[in-house]
Amino acid sequence: MTVTDSGSAYVVLLATGGTISSRGSEAGGGAVASDTGEQVFASIGVPAAHPVRVVDVLRKGSYLLTVDDMIAICARVRDALSDPQVLGVVITHGTDTMEETAYLAELTHDDPRPVVFTGAQHAADSPTPDGPGNLARAIAVAGSPESRGQGVLLAFAGTIFPAAGVRKCHTTRLNAFANPDFGTAGAVSESGEVSMKPAGPVIASLPLPGSGAGSSRVDLVPVYPGADATLLRASRQAGAAGIVLQGTGTGNANREICREVAEATASGIVVVTSTRVEAGAVVPVYGDGGGGDLRAAGAISSGLLRPSQSLILLSLLLRLGTPASRIAETFALRGGPGRGTSPSQKLPKMTSQKEQ
Ligand code: ASP
């Protein structure tokens, strides 16, 4: 049911594009985001668990989104939640960068009402679209009292994840997401029954900057066998205010990269060390260009944050004009156990850990 009057409680559906709205292009090219939010909503084909108001925000593949687009989406979440009749918000979004927008929404979310991201792996015109089922379940989650106080969630293929730590883990499988460090937040059945685990500790939200205001360049630079400092130098020359280093293992690089990181941090660029490994914390234990040397060169550890979400946190903090010392504190807080984490989960000690 689409909301036509403001008399009853309802869920807002913010449509941004992605595969859930995509169809093959006429020229026989690849699928492109085509359907409006109303078309995406109509595709569920069964009565929704709650009344829904549809808002078109963007119509793009999420591989095209910028951080400014993500800020704009989060601003629309705020607008939606300004109506006390709103039970919660669903965002249909491409899966490629859903973990980035969902994390930005989580960082800036300060309302007990849930925000639920979903999308699809199969296009809207596929013979077996998964978007309608995912959307119907996401609406059930967003309107459920069970979801209140759970923050920003990602509901996909029946599993509900907390936004912090969630990642796309498979290119084509229908259950495309995982949250290796923080696990799941709950589950939603095909008929819309929602069961949630107790919410993890809440970390105070950060302000949402204006779109484009004080935008800062943040680059993601990978470390790989034989990597030299060329990419880091290029990032510096391009005017980066922040760099996320995708290290190996516990967050390691090599001597040449460490020298360049020292120069970058000395010139005021904030460098964060994350890792290409799927789970576990960045732990600065190694010398010889390893994580211990990166820390000595002034790099901040991302803790449990993967490169994708480290980039979002660093971009947000730099746009907010946060000083480097405060950025380090925020990564220590956010990179540790947070919402969606069992209170007993602790970061490992930073000494004598051997790489496997
Ligand atoms: N494969 C992507 C999707 O699920 C494309 C995108 O991220 O928009 O929507």
Image (cartoon, rainbow, N blue to C red):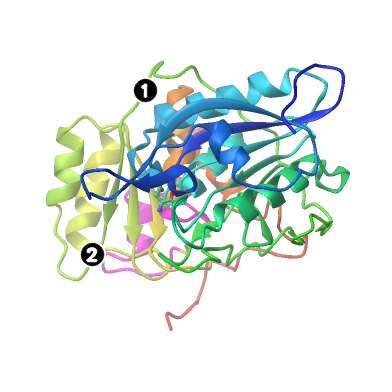
Which dot marks residue 353?
A: none
Residue identified by numbered label 1: 215
Residue identified by numbered label 2: 254
Q: Measuring 74% from the left and 39% from the top, which residue is drawn there?
A: 114
- Write down the region rendered in magenta: 284-307
Q: Measuring 40% from the left and 37% from the top, which residue is drawn there?
A: 34
Give coordinates of residue 138: x percent, y percent: 69, 48
Foreground tag (2 vs 1) = 1
Give coordinates of residue 87: x percent, y percent: 80, 32
**Residue 298 seen anywhere in this rendered image of the structure:** no
**Front position in the image: 50 or 79:** 50
**Front position in the image: 249 or 153:** 153
**Front position in the image: 95 or 288:** 95
Q: Amino acid at mark 2?
A: Asn
Report the quarter where the N terminus lies: top right
Helix, strand or loop at disc 1? loop
Give the vertical position of 64 relative to 259 (above or below): above
Mark toward the start of the polypeptide (2 vs 1): 1
Residue 167 as seen in the image, left or right of residue 261: right
Give the vertical position of 154 relative to 203 (above or below): below
